Amino acid sequence: MIPMNTHYTELKDSYLFYRIAQKVNAYLEEHPGARLYRMGIGDVSLPLCSAVIRALHEAVDDQAVKSRFHGYMPECGAPFLREAIAGYYAQRGVTLAPDEAFVSSGASDELGDILDLFDRSSTALVIEPAYPAYVDANVLAGRKILHLASGKENGFLPEPDEGLQADLLYICSPNNPTGAVFTREKLQKWVDYANRHGSLILFDAAYEAFIEDPTLPHSIFELPGARTCAVEICSLSKTAGFTGTRLGYTVIPKDLERGGLRLNDMWVRNRTTKTNGVSYIIQKGGAAVFTPEGQRQVRENIQVYKSNAKLLTDVLDKLGVWYCGGKNAPYIWMKCPDGLTSWAFFDRLLHEIQVVGTPGEGFGACGEGYFRFSTFGDPEDTKEAARRLTGLLGRR
Ligand code: PLP
């Protein structure tokens, strides 16, 4: 018998989005043809911008011509894209060498694969509520997980406690699901903690492009000391609508060492062993995001999602409902009314106003009593959902 990875049996069996889909399907069976307003999805609703589409078409044409054809790409990313990423960081005053940016097929892949760099005996700290993949990837690897609860009292942005003993620290800012964003001062405390303890921060910056407050950090590398304690995982999924096209990047500074090993060198070795690079066509499309035209166009799309956020936060402001997020993040995290549990509020929204959101409990126990709205939906649907929400919450 092959010894199997039995950690699969330790995963929570009813994954959040699966349970939501079950409830929605049951409702649709009872109410055939019902119109639903989906404010739960983390997927984008707008198409790729024209600068990206043009670059993708040109790259397809290159593949038809012998002199412009590309076969295997460099495993760690095409130089033209690694340079474009370094240029993007430079605009924010962060100096990166192009070979500190590794091109990936998206943040999810990297969040799982990066764990190859650490022994299974290392411990992972997950600040909750959290994106479920952090916990699941570590469960599968058999790693001990420490859950650090956050709450309304600290704005869902906890500070490190000297008593904490964790090797890997997951920080997601802007956060999914809470929409909370670390200030420089608060993030600096985690950087200092990690450097003091020899821990390593896995900084998930998938939503950095949604930050509009100029005082908030987009990248952990804007902070002194981060180059010796952090890896940053980024994605073009939400920034530029690449959820289906698939492209991301991971920044691993060359100064980052643990146990006498340089993580940048280890990752080069990992990528050259485990991948054959991301497609030339997709990397060309990704590089177009970082051109001035691409940047202008992706920001226009982000503004559409921000208008969605405003429709929903205006309702919550008017009714005096507590929430965070929505301004510098595409998620709104609200307190459920009338002391309802998050699944009870989910059922009420679905059955009374046909709005679908995401129960906070699915992101960790401390998410109970909260609810997440995504702002990636269709603007007309969001407008109608906001109108219905006003009616429902105003009736209390
Ligand atoms: N990290 C966070 C916090 C996310 O919310 C998501 C997707 O929703 C991802 C990573 C995954 O992004 P990608 O589409 O690049 O795999």
Image (spheres, rainbow, N blue to C red):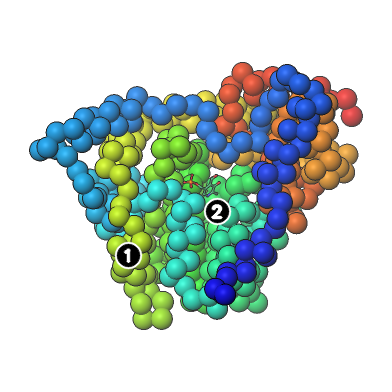
In the image, residue 36 lies at what x, y percent? 70, 24
Q: Residue at x 70, y 55 (%)?
A: 13
Q: Judge by depth and name the residue closer to the eye, 29 or 301.
A: 29
Q: Residue at x 21, y 30 (%)?
A: 61
Q: Residue at x 65, y 69 (%)?
A: 146
Q: Residues within 10 Å of mark 1 (few under 14, many from 20)?
A: few
Q: Residues within 10 Å of mark 2 (few under 14, many from 20)?
A: many
Q: Earlier in the sequence, mark 1 or mark 2?
A: 2
In the image, residue 159 lies at what x, y percent? 63, 63
Q: Residue at x 75, y 56 (%)?
A: 365
Q: Is residue 57 left or right of residue 369?
A: left
Q: Quadrant of residue 19?
A: top right
Q: Is residue 379 left or right of residue 47?
A: right
Q: Quadrant of the N terminus?
A: bottom right
* Residue beneath disc 2: 172
Q: Residue furthest left?
A: 67
Q: Quadrant of the C terminus?
A: top right
Foreground: disc 1 or disc 2:
1
Instruction: Give me the disc on residue 46.
Output: none
Q: Amino acid at mark 2?
A: Cys
Cα–Cα span, label 1 and label 2: 28 Å
Residue 253 seen anywhere in this rendered image of the structure = no
* Residue beneath disc 1: 273
Residue 50 seen anywhere in this rendered image of the structure = yes
In the image, residue 162 lies at what x, y percent? 62, 75
Q: Quadrant of residue 316?
A: top right
Q: Amino acid at mark 1?
A: Thr
Q: Does the Cβ of the disc 2 residue fall within 8 Å of ligand 1?
A: yes
1 and 2 marks in contact (CB < 8 Å): no
